[in-house]
Amino acid sequence: MKKLLLTLSAFLAFGTYAQTILYSEDFETGGTSISLNATDLSSTPLGVNYWVINNAYTGGAGTVTCLGFPFSFTVPNTAAQPGGITGSINSNYLHIVGEAAVNSGINCSSFQAADGICTFNENNFSKMTSDISTIGYSDVTFDLYWMLGGSPEIYGEIYYSTDGGTTWTLQQGQLNSQTTWTQSSFTNSLWDDVTSLRFGFRFVNTTASTVAEPGFCIDEINITGTMATSNPAITSSVTGGIEVFCGGDNIEVDYTVTDVALNMGNTFTLELSDETGSFAAATAIGTASSTNMTGSITGTIPAGATPGMGYRVRVNSSDVAQTGTDNGTDLIIASTPATPTITLNGSGDLESSYAGTNIWFQDGFLITGESGSTITPLADGVYTVQATNDTCVSAVSDDFSYSTVGVSIDELNDFSIYPNPTNGIISLNGNHALISSLELLEVSGKVISVFEPSIKTIDAVGAAPGVYFLRVSTSEGIHTLKFIKK
């Protein structure tokens, strides 16, 4: 089981020390923190021997073909594990297996020794998949359980890398002649206070005359370090020095952790105070899962936040729990106008419920040059509006669908009406001989009156104040004339 941990086993006062587990792997959930059968150090990925992770301990008999002849062999049971190993006595473990043994149904630890005739020299390498940081830690210790029979020519090696696996340095060689599980620990000052550290394991198989099972076996890997904790703190500042925000705005906050040992499951929480700077009823506005000692968190100012000039933010950690100090500077949350609504007024214009500055859109596109509370629609479409007080902008209004009932307003001036607006009596000018029908429509498109084609004066006195259309049908097409009844 991968446990890239920073577990604080003692979190004490100024001047004391905390022993920390920086990494742990017991292989009980698959060992995903280990990359098997890598090619580092001129190693063979899958040869006559290779690395596996399982919980097989039972040996058996098998056969292998060499020079065309079958040869029998026996693999002994792998030794049971001691109580110090998680899941013992027969837990999952990392180990070498021989291809011939696996083909014979034997999956416990084994290896096919190099003899220079049927099996030739090869190495097999496995390694940690990612680096750990030991910044702030001393006395970094690498600890594991292992065993390997082998011989002076067949042995295990432990390597480390401080550059992401680009180069490997031998820490311990000639691991052999150990047929039961044993625990070993290694320290190296070069592992202290580095940003990148990982370990690898190589099984070396060169020609030998006398060998012993089992193959290289590894379990219960732990990397620990000691960290002095003098003044644990989490400080924060608003990225870019921004001080004025609106409801719904994103806010990015940089944080720095000092002398706090964070576990792998840690979550940072960005909190917002009330308008007086009090965190008594703080609001969580953002989170980030991380063990990084420096970083940033993005949060969102609540849309309904009370306008005020004394807000603060802070960053807290969950594991280990640490309450951060606030950012040290007052933040302003400005008022945001309410979401406006659009109506069609008596002049046939679209009107926003917000009396101040408005931002108008048609079909999602900004209408340039329009910032008042009313606009005259120049085309059919879906209109929306936002209200702004020059600092904050409201949410977008509901859609308002404006339509001239599907016919084109007369652009050729073949016909005209006057006066417009009118008290109810309007005159129609144009070539009346071409008119085949004459209709009065509400803005919804409903026909409310039909007139004789020859009539030149339209009586709309009885109509309620509002916007109307006079639809003139001729042999040349339909003309729609808009007018306003006062």
Image: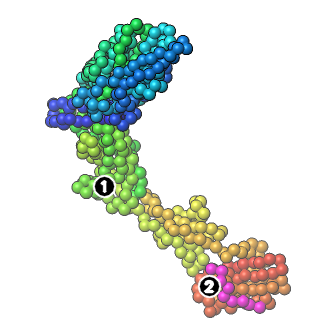
Residue 232 sits in which quadrant? top left
Quarter of the C terminus within the rendering:
bottom right
Residue at 34%, 54% in the rendered image: 332
Residue at 30%, 18% in the rendered image: 179
Give the camera-side residue of 480 and 302: 302
Which contiguous range is marked in magenta?
443-452
Mark 2 crowdedness (10 Å alpha carbons): few <14, some 14-19, many ≥20 = many
- Label 1: which residue? 283
Q: Which is nearer the N-term, disc 1 or disc 2?
A: 1
Give the camera-side residue of 133 and 157: 157
State whether residue 380 is above or below residue 12.
below
State whether residue 131 is above or below residue 113.
below
- Label 2: which residue? 485
Quarter of the N terminus within the rendering:
top left
Where residue 241 appears, as percent x and y from the top left, is 37, 44
Mark 1 crowdedness (10 Å alpha carbons): few <14, some 14-19, many ≥20 = some
